[in-house]
Amino acid sequence: MTFEGKIVLITGGSRGIGKSIAEAFAESGATTIVTYRNAIDNEYFDSKGIRHFQCDVADIKSVQEMIDKIISEHQKIDILVNNAGITKDGLLMRMSEEDWDMVLDTNLKGVFDMTKSVTRHMMGKRYGKIVNITSVVGITGNPGQSNYVASKAGVIGFTKATAKELASRNININAVAPGFIGTEMTDKLPEEVKAKYLETIPLKRIGSGKNIADAVMFLASDMSDYITGQTICVDGGLVM
């Protein structure tokens, strides 16, 4: 699968799933750009030919300034992957308003900010592919994550609404819902916790960042031209 000549923008691309997606697009020949909020390994991303912008996706001014710079240089953005996300887990009765707002601002408002800013340019080109990274918990729910679940369920609804709005402009918008994926965060979990998760996964293995990147690249490719408004679970069969 090649993306030669395509301009790809990935939010939250400095580590984890976002990093895997960025690496896959860069290896496929795309001009790949990632955003990060706090820190990034400049040397590593430079060696991969991946450009990077510090940007808080929850800050519309910061987003618009970045998009304007990219458009000024490349004249287009073909593919947007909304991956940036945070967690502030806690039981509802103990959750602070601040923790609720922080998660919703990044995980849901950030998708709104990026999509609105990018589609203004995609509409003029009458072409675009947007892939939103949600989560299987946005479908199933999960105790202790009411803020995160609400944000990810919101992303699924946002995907459907915007897909209907923008289909006439040849802009496809879909979502990928990862299940239990091996990242720096999940690697730190105790082995007994991992074993408990594996019991619930029919394929009996933890997913990888590459598994998510493969699904994203399919939805960003011409092979998915007749697919829009869908959420694909990449979860080893966890949600059926």
Image: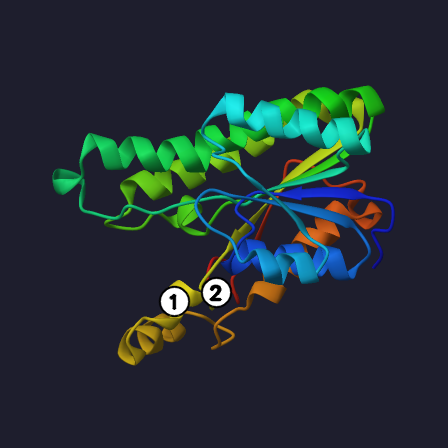
> How crowded is the residue under tag 2: few (<14 C-alpha within 10 Å), some, or many (20+)?
many
Q: How many marks?
A: 2
Query: What is the x, y in percent for residue 154?
Result: 45, 33
For the residues bearing labels 1 and 2, Cβ distance under 8 angstroms: yes
Q: Is residue 122 above or below residue 180?
A: above
- Assign a secondary structure to mark 2: loop
One can see residue 234 in this view? no
> How crowded is the residue under tag 1: few (<14 C-alpha within 10 Å), some, or many (20+)?
few
- Assign a secondary structure to mark 1: helix
Question: Would residue 204 appear left or right of 99 to someone viewing this image?
Answer: right
Residue 186 numbered mark, or none: 1
Closer to the camera, 52 or 58?
52
Question: Would residue 153 appear left or right of 97 to someone viewing this image?
Answer: right
Question: Would residue 144 appear left or right of 149 to someone viewing this image?
Answer: left
Query: What is the x, y in percent for residue 45?
Result: 63, 57
One can see residue 237 in this view? yes
Closer to the camera, 198 or 49?
49
The kind of residue on which mark 1 rests is: Thr
Question: Which residue in the rendered view is the most extreme toward the front?
Answer: 43
Quadrant of image for the N terminus: bottom right
| Residue found 63% across the figure and 23% down from its top | 117
Q: Quadrant of residue 147?
A: top left
The kind of residue on which mark 2 rests is: Ile
User: Colour scheme in the image?
Assistant: rainbow
Q: Is residue 210 above or below residue 36?
A: below
Closer to the camera, 73 or 104?
73
Residue 181 numbered mark, or none: 2
Query: What is the x, y in percent for residue 60?
Result: 51, 23
| Residue found 40% across the figure and 37% down from its top | 151
Question: Would residue 225 appear left or right of 112 to someone viewing this image?
Answer: right
